[in-house]
Amino acid sequence: MFSISEKSILSSRLLSFLIAFSMFLLISSSLSLIEFEENSFVPKSVLQLIPNLVSNASVNNQIPNAIIVDAQESPVKSPVFPNETLNNTISVDEPEEKHLTRKCDKTKAHLKVYMHDLPPKFHFGLLGWNAPANQTWPSLTDRVKLPSYPGGLNLQHSTEYWLTLDLLSSSNKDIVRPCTAIRVENSSEADVIFVPFFSSLSYNRFSKHRQNRKGSGDKVLQEELVNFLVKTKEWKRSRGKDHLIVAHHPNSMLIARRKLGSCMFVLSDFGRYSSRIANLKKDVIAPYKHMVRSIAADNSPLFDERPILAYFQGAIYRKDGGAIRHELYYLLKNEKDVHFTFGSAHQSTGVREAGKGMAHSKFCLNIAGDTPSSNRLFDAIATHCVPVIISDEIELPFEDVLDYSEFCVFVRAKDAVRKGHLLNILRGIKNERWSRMWEKLKEISGRFEYEFPSRENDAVDMIWQTVSRKNVSTRLSVHRKNRYTRSQFRLRM
């Protein structure tokens, strides 16, 4: 039997429980009646906080990152790489759930694009796609069956593939993507005429001469492309000034570029072009697709977790501006905290090791080679390794909206080869300054990612944004030239 004091304690506890439970029911029923309008007396942020408290609690209990301990180094956090196909074939990413909630309002598109229906031999046919009868483009319904771009070093110059897929997807109501550029069926409505020729792939696969052929397969395709374009009403209307052609590989379009120089080109740099054919006034510099895997921002090693001061691995003896590589090699090869070696990115193991090396380096050297640019800059960005750009003639993607000095170090070639100069600069950049650049790298790295479907401010979207800005100045020039020619034509009518 309970004593009187024990009974009173139990009664008190029961009463407290009933009161608390009643208050809970009252609050719950009240919240269910509240409408989430702008004039609601309960702020949305307060109501949204309730489920967030639960999710935050689970996040705070995550298992900490694995630590790699080297016998000769301080503990270094192992970078965590997102799931990605490595150096084999391009895979298309499934959109995240949050991405699916964004619907595209086509009336707000910055750029209306008409795409020539070139035969498959100019684009997806180069990927081995056998087009069914009377079908120009592959279906986007089953992404697993989409023709994939070949791996290896081909991947660097796959810009043509992503832009074409993106335009095709703009006509598919089931694919959600940014509304920067949309495909239109009537060329008279278009701001830009897109030429879907996979020129980089054509060069990589068919640039060598074959028996019983006049020239290479690549040359034949280029000549056929020129013959096709110059006969179209779209070309005759503007003499090609509103046409957009991707020639990202420095050696692609060598034959046709002289005849199509009035077009807007998407390039990696201007190293193999004269200023008459290609220049910043009309053309677009696009990023390489990086070869190494991207590091997850939340797991990117900090300053003290990157024991290597400067990293470079690649071909050292190059032509032209790339001669500086072997000079730097002899200056830096014996420095204990510098990794400067011969290396190849042709094998997946080489790419994997390079990715790990860059992820554990404070600075990654981007040195001019046969041309001013290389994919190393974008490998460095993907691994949040502060790029050191030693290439005086380099042109950089999206530089009209990105300030590269916030996340890169620039050193003139003549200064870099002075003994001790480069290392003095890098060793003079301490934790605080380096960390600001590292934070900026994490912030902007998504702008250099090629994805399908494209996402807001990824590489594909950023290219379309750049084309839109270039197109404005191009239209201004065309309209100014038409001031008198068109009006005089009307007077004669």
Image: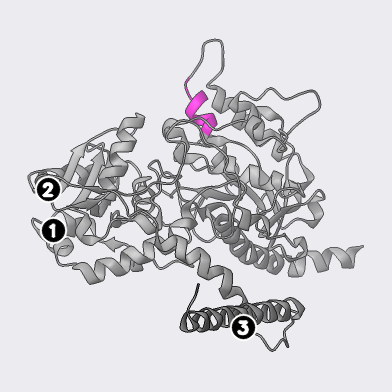
Q: Nearer the viewer, residue 218 or 205?
A: 205
The residue labelled by disc 2 is 332
Estimate the x, y position of residue 234 in percent, counting from the top left: 76, 48
Which mark, by number, is residue 333? none
Residue range highlighted in magenta? 201-208
User: Of helix, strand and loop, which one carries label 3?
Assistant: helix
**Separation of disc 1 and disc 3 at Cα?**
71 Å
Horizontal side of 480 relative to 336 (left or right) equals right
Q: Earlier in the sequence, mark 1 or mark 3?
A: 3
Magenta stretch: includes residue 206: yes
**Separation of disc 2 and disc 1 at Cα?**
9 Å
**Separation of disc 2 and disc 3 at Cα?**
75 Å
**Picture residue at 64% right of the left edge, 42% below the top:** 165
Whether residue 298 is visible here, answered yes or no, is yes
Magenta stretch: includes residue 432: no
Question: Of the residues shown, which amino acid type is indicated by label 1?
Answer: Leu
Estimate the x, y position of residue 97 in percent, counting from the top left: 62, 54
The residue labelled by disc 1 is 423
Up-down relation of residue 33 to residue 298 (above or below): below
> In terms of image quadrants, where is residue 43?
bottom right
The residue labelled by disc 3 is 19
